[in-house]
Amino acid sequence: MKRIIIMISCVSGVWAAAQIAPPPVQRSTTTSRGLTINSRKGTLIEKKIINVGKFKNLNIQKIETKDASDNSSETFLGIMYEYETFDEISKKTLTIDKNELGKLIQALRTVEQKENEKSNQETKYKFITMSNIEFGSVYREKLSSWVNYIKIPSSHYNQNLLEFSKEELKELIGILRKAEQEL
């Protein structure tokens, strides 16, 4: 009898615990450093966006956020792009901080120098930012030419790959250098 009572109480306890709903999932905007903008509840955040340039279908922006309670501010580079699925068009902004931007510019300059050298085999270069933007260059032996690309992270349904030429690489480096000076 005792075993039946203990067993019934254990089963009812497990059943009652299973009826409790999990906490709701909260979505937040994340910066490149992993900080969430809405992690400071009850604080007024000011956000300013200054357009620096446009490369292909990417808008390069300077983004300033300021916490009104303690006047602390952050400035970083934003890369905004539009993407489309079957039934919606959306915009997304990925961020790069100033230190990472300097490393990116240096990596792109190195790729630019390597493109000027002759290569006789297939060669690849890539630089991935903290927000998973991939900048790369591939030497195609069959075509005897370099293909530069930017791969934007997105859902598995949507492929965002921008290919560009050697001349456009110089243009991209120029826009990023201008953005670095403004940060």
Image (cartoon, rainbow, N blue to C red):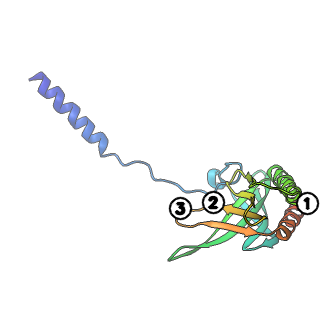
The residue under label 2 is 153
Instruction: Provide the secondary structure element on which disc 3 rests.
Output: loop
Q: Which residue: 53% across, 61% down?
A: 156
Q: Of residues 168 and 80, which is closer to you in this image?
A: 168
The residue under label 3 is 156
Point out the image quarter for the N terminus.
Answer: top left
- Residue 41 in view in this figure: no
Residue 97 versus residue 52 in the image, above or below: above
Amino acid of disc 2: Pro
Which of the two discs, 1 and 2, sits closer to the camera?
Answer: 2
Residue 30 versus residue 157 in the image, above or below: above
Does residue 18 appear to the left or right of 162 in the view shown? Answer: left
Residue 89 versus residue 6 in the image, above or below: below
Q: Measure how far apart labels 1 and 3 are at the Cα level.
A: 35 Å
- Residue 66 in view in this figure: yes
Query: Whole-percent x and y of residue 99?
Result: 83, 49
**Among the two numbered marks 1 and 2 on one chain, the one whose residue lies closer to the N terminus:** 2
Query: Whole-percent x and y of residue 62?
Result: 80, 64
Query: Whole-percent x and y of residue 165?
Result: 80, 69
Amino acid of disc 3: His
Which label belongs to residue 181? Answer: 1
Q: Of residues 64 and 109, which is closer to you in this image?
A: 109
Q: Measure how far apart labels 1 and 2 are at the Cα level.
A: 26 Å
| Residue most extreme to the left | 1
